[in-house]
Image (cartoon, helix red, strand yellow):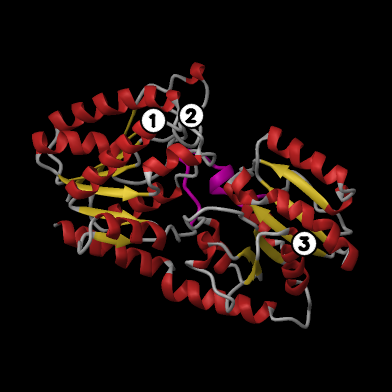
Amino acid sequence: MKLLVVAPQPFFSPRGTPFSVYYRTLISVELGCEIDFLTYGQGENVDIPNVRFYRTPPFSFLGPIKLGPSALKLFHDIFIFFWMLWLLIRNKYDVVHVHEEAVFFATFLKPLFRFKLLYDMHSSLPQQLTNFNFTKSKFLINTFRWLEDKSLAKSEAIITICPDLFDYVNKVLPGNNKNFLIENSILEPVRIAGCSTGQNEEASALPVAIPATFKHIAVYAGTLESYQGIDLLIDAIPLIKEKNPDIGFVIVGGTQEQVENFQRQANALNVTDNVIFTGRVTQNIARAYSNLATILLSPRSSGTNTPLKIYEQLASSIPLVATAIYSHTQVLTDDVAFLVEPTPQDIARGVLEATNPNGAGKEKAINALNLYNKEYARPVYVKKLQTVLEYLS
């Protein structure tokens, strides 16, 4: 089967975290697919055998392409569209596998080139417009919703990445049999082409040392966007410090501006000795910090899509404290994690329970690993993707 994969994102860039695109492509090749891959010029080349990569001009002088909708992303998408058109004219593809807004281009071009359309749906695009505060225009949001619904109807198959999106598609297309749930749950490191360090190597030295005073190490690794609940976590630290001053917090990720903002919050609460911030690091260094953890944290305050890190946390054999919001509870239960309300008081309670040597942390961590192996490990992922490809063929 010959596929054209179209991913309008900085591939590969940890800031854009397009891990799911990488793993889908890697496994598709392993399953015998021949792939041409079209993406933005920004990002690093990855090492996937038998994949031909095509990149649009990077236009680096215009600045980096950030997560979510933007005028800059729209500019880059113009080049994605015409490059996609050129590839379709030159080559015959059995399937066009599209991500994000590229589904709109594929829906438009599909009648001309008669390919089968596979839509890899990571989020609802009209929801993105409001989640990233791009617009409040009802006309624009409704236009995107109409385009998305039309694209879903025209797709031969749809991959959704979490139960919330799976249910959403089934509401738009009641009674369909082309909606496949494949969680972003593979944990292998990304292979950067021609690179002997960074993503391809284990972290040899941590950029910020963990103080010896941290007898218990609570680690959060991810972005520091407002919905991640880092403000709630920092507000919980004084409450935790009062009961157990030996618990230290390592917050991995975030831009310099975000780190400085949360550092000020920690200063105001007089907990600077109890928390360190690393800023943005490579995937492997983030994992190195997580591997040193006594407990792992996901204090997210809002959202419906399951975070990628949840699957890694399940597989870690380390107790997890996570907020009891739908973003988490569509995967997590009280059997596998310490679920808490998104408040400083309840986060503090969960952290103290998880670090209690006589508590249920060890049992929950074992249950979490068993759940990962049963529902989300690589063999399960491969079988799910194979089912989609067989359905399309």
The single residue placed furthest to the front in the displayed view is 138
Residue 298 lies in quadrant: bottom right
Check residue 199 for magenta coloring. Answer: yes
Residue drawn at point x = 27 percent, y = 54 percent: 172
In this view of the protein, can residue 162 be seen by the observer? no
Give the spatial CA distance, label 2 vs label 3. 34 Å
Is residue 304 positioned above or below 379 on the image?
above
**Residues at discs 1 and 2 in contact (Cβ within 8 Å):** yes
Give the spatial CA distance, label 1 vs label 3. 38 Å
Residue 65: which disc?
2
Amino acid type, residue under disc 2 in the picture: Ile
- The tag earlier along the polypeptide, 1 or 3, is 1
Is residue 322 positioned above or below 122 on the image?
below
Residue 348 lies in quadrant: bottom right
Residue that mark 1 sits on: 40
Count every numbered label the image shows and give the total.
Answer: 3
Residue drawn at point x = 66 percent, y = 36 percent: 255
**Range of the magenta residues?**
188-203
* x and y, in percent, of residue 96 in the image: 21, 43
Residue drawn at point x = 31 percent, y = 23 percent: 79
Check residue 244 for magenta coloring. Answer: no
Q: Is residue 185 left or right of residue 108?
A: right
